Image (cartoon, helix red, strand yellow):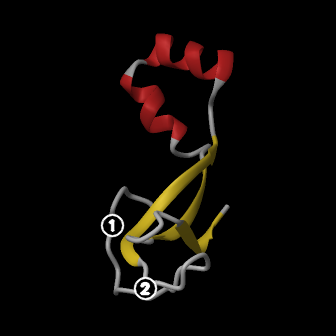
Amino acid sequence: MFGFGEHQEAMTATCPSCQSPMEDKGAHGIRMGGLTGLAGAAAGAVLGQLADEGEEAFEKKLAVQVFVCPQCREVSFKYHGGL
């Protein structure tokens, strides 16, 4: 559910700016936190690849459906869950 570009069933949305139909770009995860700063750098230096995998347990992600308007380029998100 949180991978980049995962597609579920298509949803529809109308652009709030120009009222055109928006293109559904699928479900995406937006990272809201995790190991950053000195803690993340230290973990990366000491543990290498394991730090990247271990960070997944501490990350907070928001699952959203992404829509883009082909006319005015407005971007819209619909909340799926997370955090």
Residue ID at (43%, 85%): 21
* Label disc, if present, on residue 67 of the rendered structure: none
The quadrant the C terminus occupies is bottom right
Relative image position of residue 4 (x, y in whole percent):
36, 56
Q: CA distance from mark 1 to mark 2?
A: 21 Å
Judge left or right: residue 7 versus residue 59.
Answer: left
Circle 2: element type: loop
Circle 1: element type: loop
Q: Quadrant of residue 9?
A: bottom left
Residue ID at (66%, 20%): 37
Question: On the image, numbered disc 2 is attached to which residue?
Answer: 21
Image: 70 above or below 59? below
Judge left or right: residue 46 versus residue 4.
Answer: right
* In the foreground, 30 or 36: 30
Image: 78 above or below 82? below
Badge 1 or badge 2: first in the primary sequence: 1
**Numbered circles on residues, count:** 2
Q: Are marks 1 and 2 in contact (CB under 8 Å)?
A: no
Image: 76 above or below 11? above
Question: On the image, numbered disc 1 is attached to which residue?
Answer: 6
Type of the residue with mark 1: Glu
Residue ID at (51%, 44%): 56
Image: 30 above or below 82? above
Specify whether residue 47 is in view: yes
How many neighbours does mark 2 have within 10 angstroms: few (below 14), some (14-19), or many (20 or more)? Answer: some
Q: Quadrant of residue 82?
A: bottom right
The quadrant the N terminus occupies is bottom left
Type of the residue with mark 2: Pro
Relative image position of residue 61 (x, y in whole percent):
59, 55
